[in-house]
Amino acid sequence: MLPRRLQPVLDRWVAGELTESEFLKETDWRTVWGFDPAFYLPILQFARLHRLPVVALNVERPLISRTARNGWAAIPEADREGVGNPAAPTETYRNRLTETLAAHDRSESQAAAPPMPPIASSRRKASGTARWRRRSPRPAGPPAAPSSASWGRAIPSTAMASRT
């Protein structure tokens, strides 16, 4: 969630040297990440309580934008913030990804789903998540999708291969 340059702030948080508000201010949370901190503070507090390291793995937003616009191959190695080329996906990974994407096919899911009653729509609008979305420049939380842990492993082998 945070870029690598903010690792020292994460380290100070885990060490108990920062208050919650200092942490959010020093990470420039709303600009850098933008999601409601209430979604992430419980896990960050757990890490702090148990002195577990939290690692800043993201890259800066301009690199993300350049990659989306031009593709990874167009980014010079010196501008990649230490990120190498991804490992080739395994056949198992490709099959699982195809399965997951098929489950999100809107035309099938919308045709099969009954129409949402107006009351459910009103409840969603009245929820805290809806209120946060109005203030936030980005969606209130990460999209719902199966995690790699639900696939029987915590870190996919393709991610581990690129760490060598």
Image: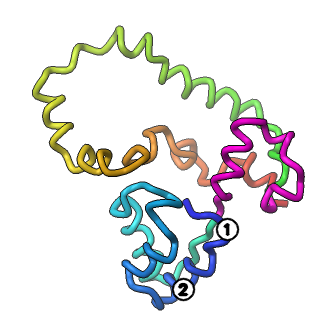
Q: Camera-side residue: 154 or 53?
A: 53
CA–CA distance in space, label 2 to label 1: 14 Å
Q: Residue 150: x, y in percent?
A: 51, 44
Q: Residue at x 30, y 15 (%)?
A: 113
Q: Nearer the viewer, residue 106 or 70?
A: 70
The residue lying toward the viewer, choosing from 41 and 19, is 19
Give SS at disc 1. Answer: helix
- The number of callouts visible is 2
**Which of the marked residues, 2 or 1, is nearer the chain's N terminus?**
1
Residue 92 picture location, percent across and down:
71, 32
**Residue identified by numbered label 2:** 12
> Helix or strand or loop: what does disc 2 sit on?
helix
Residue 31, given in percent of the width and then of the height, sits at 49, 60
Relative to 26, residue 122 above or below: above
Q: Is residue 76 magenta?
A: yes
Relative to 66, 1 lies left or right: left
Residue labelled with disc 1: 4
Q: Residues within 10 Å of mark 1 (few under 14, many from 20)?
A: some
Q: Image height check: is 152 above or below 46?
A: above
Range of the magenta residues?
A: 57-82
Label 2 neighbourhood size at 10 Å, few (<14), some (14-19), many (20+)?
some
Q: Amino acid at mark 2?
A: Arg
Q: Residue at x 83, y 56 (%)?
A: 79
In the image: residue 130, left or right of residue 96: left
